[in-house]
Amino acid sequence: MGVRKEAGTLGAGDTAALQQAFARAYQIRDERGYAYFAGLHGLPLPSYCAHNTRLFLPWHRAYLYFFERALQDLVPAANLTWWDWTTGRSRTEGLPAAFRRSAARVNSNPLAAGPVPLSAEDLRRLRADPANRGALSAGPAPWTLRDPDDPAELPRAATIARALAAPTFDDLSTLLEGVHSSVHGWVGGAMTLISVAAYDPVFWAHHAMIDRIWSLWQNAGRGAPLPPELLGRPLPPFPVTVRDMLDPARLGYGYAVEVAG
Amino acid sequence: MAGFADTTTDPVRQTRTSAIAYPGTGDFSRADLVFTGVRHAGGSYEVRVFLNNPGATVDTGRDAGDGYAGRFHVFGHGGCFGDLGHCDVPGASDDPGDLRPPHQLTPLTTYLTVTGPLSRLLAGGTALATVTMLAVSLPPRRADRAPGLDLFVFDHIDLRIYRTPGATPP
């Protein structure tokens, strides 16, 4: 079973496997590659992501699942990692070290930025709005940019505790989506726009944290089960329904706080 | 329930204020400000909410003394990338045979839990009279952030009070 570890606790081997998988995925332009998966969230159209609906959590769980499987086809040891933005380290240092730019003048860390191989027309439309300046680097083959905020502005553990006490799935989903949106805004750059957010590698670590909180809520058993009418809903383009996404263990992954040995 | 059209705007402070009166005593277990019909087609933004402080500005502190009740965030699409009409949201279908999912830009519903701030206000002997909303853009570059009246458009706002038997009031 794959173990997703917290980004601040990754060993050198974990980080190297993830870096290698992302770097290889960047080179693949078909449906096994990074551009395909990042594009499902926004550009190029059609966009499939479920935001502001009751499918927010299950759709993104499926998204992470299929992307992680694609990474593991390239590098079997690669597991997604979750960025716990509530830790003292995050609220002091901000982005996890594994996702920061390398110290060299030219970044060599594939987790610090992702390529955005959009069509010239998509890039033109995105750049036509001055409000989108700073999302992508210049030129016909841009990369994602960031402009992180003050680390102290990241969500607090108390907010997550409130989410975990949510009495219903809908309550949890709405609250978590708001927290999720705040972190997108905190990272800045491409992450602030649904259209290109998933091209930034930290997107996946951020969403793994959201998925983990849902998983914790499920494990705690405090909340009411998902509304029955949701269970059969498909999660396109993935060949699964909400029901298929309820149990991370059945999907072959789990969230570890500590791993020894 | 107060409608968007009923809000008063302050173009200098870039705020929008809704008259929501609640003279309760604070004997509740939870209080939520619920916003329906929230638009999210443009850029991302945050909304700071103040109770009984229509004079709040972008520089107002985020603390209880200034009536600050919390903030919520909306993740925006950043514009329309389709052809003409692509981002026009159709009305809700009443056709049971229409299995298509809702348009992605269908306005959303969200809430801000204000249990603590509202309780403290009422405990001080003051009834709730106004809710002031200050929207600040969250564009890719931090330097471009700015408050804006047009950022946050919604249909309605209301205050929902819950009393759960046995629950301890805040």
Image (cartoon, coloured by chain):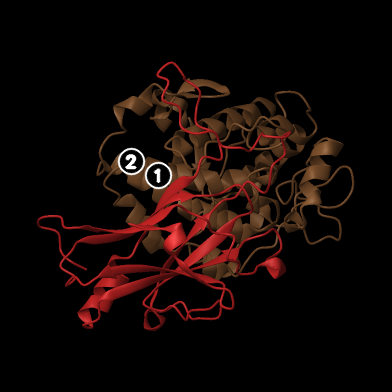
Chain colours: A brown, B red
Residue highlighted by disc 1? A173
Residue projecting furthest to the front:
B5
Q: What is the chain letter for disc 1?
A: A
Image coordinates for residue A258, horizontal then vertical, percent: 45, 49
* Three-letter amino acid code at the position of disc 2: Phe
Does label 2 lie on the same chain as label 1? yes
Residue highlighted by disc 2? A169
Q: What is the chain letter for disc 2?
A: A
Q: Quadrant of the N terminus of chain B?
A: bottom left
- Which residue is drawn at the image coordinates 69% and 44% (left, top)? A196
Viewer-side residue, A95 vs A178:
A178
* Three-letter amino acid code at the position of disc 1: Ser
Instruction: Report how far apart the C-alphas of labels 1 and 2 lie in the structure.
Output: 6 Å
Helix, strand or loop under label 2: helix
Image coordinates for residue A15, horizontal then vertical, percent: 65, 46
Image coordinates for residue A128, horizontal then vertical, percent: 81, 50
Image marks 1 and 2: residues in contact by CB distance under 8 Å? yes
**Above or below — where is A189 with respect to B134?**
above
Give left or right: position of A60 versus A244.
right
